[in-house]
Image (cartoon, rainbow, N blue to C red):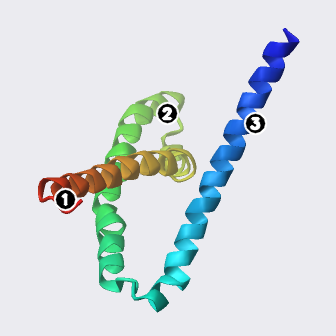
Amino acid sequence: MIANVLGWTGRKTLRFFAHVSNLGYLCWDILYWILVGPFKGRPLRWTNIIREMDDLGARSFPLIGVMSVSLGAVIVVLIGPQFRTFGIPEYVPELVTVFLVRELSPLLTGIVLAGWVGSLVTARLGTMVTDEEV
């Protein structure tokens, strides 16, 4: 029993340090290519960076807006009649605002953006494999 507990603890500890080590290597590579790469003939491609930021960030605002508006409408339709039966329909907008802004919108925005960005990057990598660029 003690051997099982110690083995489990050791495995978890080794996995944790391997994960931290991988993150360290990633940070090292990022810093290397940002700071040293331009002096070795590998400059940053600012036009590509700006285009990716636009595609992955700014172009996702309409999707997030449509999701938030439709989610707010559904919440109003579901909660409005319930509040009307209790005689407090004036609290529906406040409840929807608090519920969306504090609780649901950050969660759903993260989920939708992960799907949006993941599918966009996957499609680009698939195109690069098809065109034999990778």
What is the secondary structure assignment of the residue under circle 2?
Answer: helix
Give the image location of residue 118, x and y in percent. 34, 50
Residue 29 to residue 69: above or below:
below
Amino acid type at circle 3 is Thr
Q: What is the spatial separation of the Cα atoms under label 2 and label 1, in whole angstroms? A: 54 Å
Q: Who's the residue at 50% across and 46% down the image?
A: 107
Residue occupying image coordinates x 34% and y 47%:
115
Disc with the residue nearer the chain's start (2 vs 1): 2
Q: Amino acid at mark 2?
A: Phe
Using the image as rendered, state which of residue 9 and residue 50 is in the foreground: 9
| Quadrant position of residue 40 | bottom left
Give amino acid for label 1. Answer: Met
**Residue underneath mark 2:** 83
- Considering every residue shown, the one lying at the far right of the view is 2
Mark 3 vs mark 2, CA separation in Å: 51 Å
In the image, residue 25 lies at what x, y percent? 60, 61
For the residue pair 99 and 103, the one nearer the viewer reads as 103
User: In what element is the residue under mark 1?
Assistant: helix
Q: Identify the element where label 3 is drawn.
A: helix
Which residue position holds label 1? 128
